[in-house]
Image: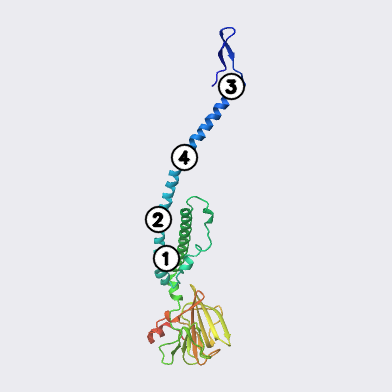
Amino acid sequence: MPKKSRYKFNPETLAYELHKIPAKVRLSRSFVVFLLSVVLSVGYYAIYSAYFKLETPKMITLLRTSEDLENKLELMNKRFEETNRTLVALEMRDNYVYRPVFGMEEIPSEVREAGFGGVDRYSYLKSFDRSGILSRTAQNIDILYKKAFLQSKSFDEVNNLARSADELSLCVPAIPPVDITSNRTRFSSSFGYRPDPFNGQYRMHNGIDLSGRIGDPVFVTGNGKVVEIGYDFFGYGNFIIVDHGFGYKTRYAHLKNSLVSMGRGVVRGEQIGLMGNTGRSKGPHLHYEVIYRNKPVNPLNYYNRDIASEEFKALVTPRG
């Protein structure tokens, strides 16, 4: 702090006299000292950081903190990879063990992996330092969240079906729709692409054909409810659709006539119609379809083609 007064030699009196320093002078000197200290500080910082390439203590602390956070993010991503491998194992077990047990279709990989390609969802992180690891971490979090959510929903579906396994076992279309042990019944057309019997063009056949005689009994293949009875002149002819629940439906077509009414509940082995030759048909037969979750599937995968006559008769209830 500058002194407010000082002694000064007076040559006229040949003595030291006390003189007061004006406030303006003191303020000017203080400002000069302050300005000089600022200049020296800036110069020191410039020489320290720019010329010698040295970091300030605060910068060193920030850099260490940043490196520590980066290491933690790397460790987190490694844990994400381990968790993802566990989820992949669960997905495979779900698709190939749990869901098939209850007749459920697997969840396609394109559904499980959907939403993580194409559009750059993490462009907002590009302006940050170390944007690469930040984007990778954000993406890993999103992937694990969606995979875990889908897997949880799948397990909920499997759990619901497991609780009603007894009912499911009776609703799955698990017996032949006609007496395949009879020498009058013949397997005449399979599921899949085949030459059309009318024009020879290859087209998809959504069921199987079982030939027999007009009036042969047709049986419902699982417990369910009649949801449609109709006539399609250029296609199925007289037909019945039964909804079995659990995603299953069956269709019985080219019937001579039906023996059930709309909305009626039916039980496996109950006779619901008579084989016929109606609609787009070249001879007496039953066109039989199994539809699972609105997609036709091969009916031969659902019943025993080597069933014995006595066993089949014990499963069905013909109308007398």
List the residue tagged with mark 4.
51
Residue 93: horizontal and vertical position, in percent? 39, 67
Q: Residue furthest front?
A: 11
Question: Is 244 situated above or below 197?
Answer: above
Farthest residue toward the top?
13
Write down the quadrant of residue 166 in the picture. Answer: bottom left
Q: Which mark is residue 70?
A: none
Q: Which mark is residue 91?
A: 1
* Quarter location, residue 174: bottom left
Amino acid type, callout 1:
Glu
In the picture of the structure, the residue carrying the numbered disc 3 is: 26
Pointer 3 local density, CA inside 10 Å: few below 14, some 14–19, many at least 20: some
Q: Earlier in the sequence, mark 1 or mark 3?
A: 3
Q: Which residue is mark 2?
A: 78
Q: Determine crowd level at label 4: few under 14, some 14-19, many 20+ residues with C-alpha closer than 10 A.
A: few
**Whole-number angstrom distance, CA of label 1 to CA of label 4:** 58 Å
